[in-house]
Image: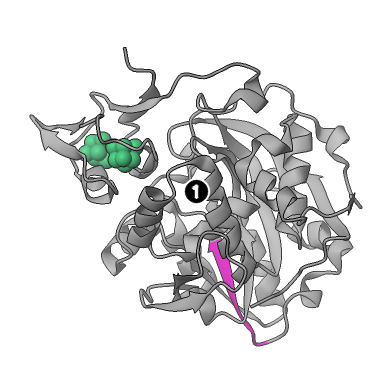
């Protein structure tokens, strides 16, 4: 599935937008228009960020209005869009249904008459140039799609600092395998190298990023929504992530996936901005996760631990997901054995109740 691999030149389009006035056609037009990426009759996976069962207002998932507008462009050229992701937790029809309902996907599917993926089969794919993985399980709905448009939510990530176009493709890996990889690749460096391995075999044809209402602070699930009012598009995952770093004044080498991509010489040499330039839409007060390290903050940061609080409903989702099996429910609240916790923050990601904060332990 080797696709767009032009590391010399890349284009990123940036537009000020709201969910109501978003114009996907004019965002994509300078990249060649939707029909330069998609042909009539093709099945097009809208690889959405559906991290967990969250309402769109919380900014954990790609906003349904954003997805709807992209799907409408694909329908205009008689291609067949469908929505898919592998959320945190077991990759099962039951879990998908829960996530689709809460995130507003069922509503879009009904309004446009498009499919939501319920195929939970997977297959092994080899990664010829993998640094950390030589093969991996990939969800069949990804492999079977004719084209992939990824729709990342622009937001923070406590382990990887930002969830952008390079990180979103982790959702092509089935849920519990993702938890296992957290346990195998504990350090940021190893984890990000594994992510770039995956992106080397599953590349989106087009990326359209939802930066209208973003998330800052302790994302990807527990941060705060913040209005940036931006939609971005590119056919190059690294170029669009570099553009976001420039807008938010983030040192790109401080983002572990971008650092590994730089080492692998995957950064585009030139990025052209046919619409707005990052300097036109600078946002200087964006809050990074409290786990952001020295390069980004200039300060040594003490390790943060996941600490359950009274919002806990004892639903047990974090217990099932924890790769080290160090969480149990005791007296109706999650309790963690910190002596074995690897601080992968999977529990923080999956919790839909904002019941796990990342804090320094006394
Ligand atoms: S911390 Fe969150 S995911 Fe874990 S049991 Fe409590 S509510 Fe459920
Ligand atoms: S308790 Fe949370 S952070 Fe610690 S290993 Fe388990 S899932 Fe990862």
- Indicate yes or no whether the magenta region holds residue 138: no
Residue 134 position within the rendered picture, expressed as x and y whole percent measured from the top left = 51, 69
Q: Residue furthest left?
A: 331
Give the position of the N terminus as an image quadrant.
bottom right
Ligand 1: quadrant of the figure: top left
Residue 75 position within the rendered picture, expressed as x and y whole percent measured from the top left = 65, 75
Residue at 74% in and 23% down: 284
Q: Is 309 rendered above or below residue 88? A: above
Which residues fall within the magenta stretch? 41-47
Q: Mark 1 highlights which residue?
A: 61
Residue 66 position within the rendered picture, expressed as x and y whole percent measured from the top left = 61, 54
Q: Could you tell whether 268 is left or right of 41 in the image?
A: right
Give the position of the C terminus as an image quadrant.
top left
Q: Could you tell whether 76 is left or right of 171 in the image?
A: right
Q: Could you tell whether 309 is left or right of 11 in the image?
A: left
Q: Is residue 351 visible?
A: no
- The front one of 306 and 315 is 306
Residue 54 position within the rendered picture, expressed as x and y whole percent measured from the top left = 40, 45
Q: Is 54 rendered above or below residue 126? A: above
Mark 1 neighbour class, 10 Å CA radius: few under 14, some 14 to 19, many 20 or more: many
Residue at 33% in and 17% down: 361
Residue at 81% in and 76% down: 36
Q: Is 279 rendered above or below residue 165? A: above
């Amino acid at each position: 599935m080797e696709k767009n691999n032009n590391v010399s030149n890349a284009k990123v389009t940036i537009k000020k937008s709201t969910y109501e006035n978003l114009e996907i056609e004019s965002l994509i037009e300078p990249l060649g228009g939707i029909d330069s990426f998609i042909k009539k009759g093709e099945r097009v996976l809208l690889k959405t960020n559906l991290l967990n069962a969250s309402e769109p207002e919380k900014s954990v998932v790609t906003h349904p209005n954003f997805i709807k507008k992209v799907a409408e462009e694909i329908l205009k050229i008689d291609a067949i869009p469908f929505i898919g992701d592998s959320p945190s937790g077991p990759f099962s029809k039951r879990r998908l249904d829960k996530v689709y309902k809460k995130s507003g996907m069922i509503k879009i599917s009904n309004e446009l008459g498009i499919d939501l993926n319920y195929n939970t089969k997977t297959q092994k794919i080899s990664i010829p140039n993998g640094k950390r993985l030589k093969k991996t399980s990939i969800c069949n709905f990804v492999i079977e799609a004719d084209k992939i448009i990824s729709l990342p939510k622009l937001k923070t990530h406590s382990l990887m600092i930002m969830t952008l176009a390079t990180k979103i493709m982790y959702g092509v890996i089935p849920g519990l395998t993702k938890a296992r990889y957290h346990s195998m690749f504990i350090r940021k460096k190893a984890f990000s190298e594994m992510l770039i391995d995956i992106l080397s075999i599953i590349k989106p044809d087009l990326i359209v990023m939802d930066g209208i209402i973003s998330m800052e602070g302790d994302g990807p699930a527990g941060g705060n929504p913040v209005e940036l009012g931006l939609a971005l598009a590119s056919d190059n995952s690294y170029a669009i992530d570099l553009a976001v770093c420039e807008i938010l004044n983030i040192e790109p080498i401080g983002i572990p996936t971008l650092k590994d991509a730089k080492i692998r010489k995957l950064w585009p040499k030139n990025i052209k901005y046919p619409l707005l330039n990052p300097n036109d839409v600078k946002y200087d007060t964006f809050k990074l996760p409290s786990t952001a390290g020295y390069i980004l903050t200039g300060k040594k940061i003490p390790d943060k631990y996941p600490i359950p609080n009274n919002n806990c409903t004892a639903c047990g989702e974090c217990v099932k997901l924890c790769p080290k099996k160090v969480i149990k429910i005791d007296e109706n609240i999650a309790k963690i054995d910190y002596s074995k916790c690897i601080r992968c923050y999977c529990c923080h990601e999956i919790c839909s109740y904002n019941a796990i904060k990342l804090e320094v332990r006394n």
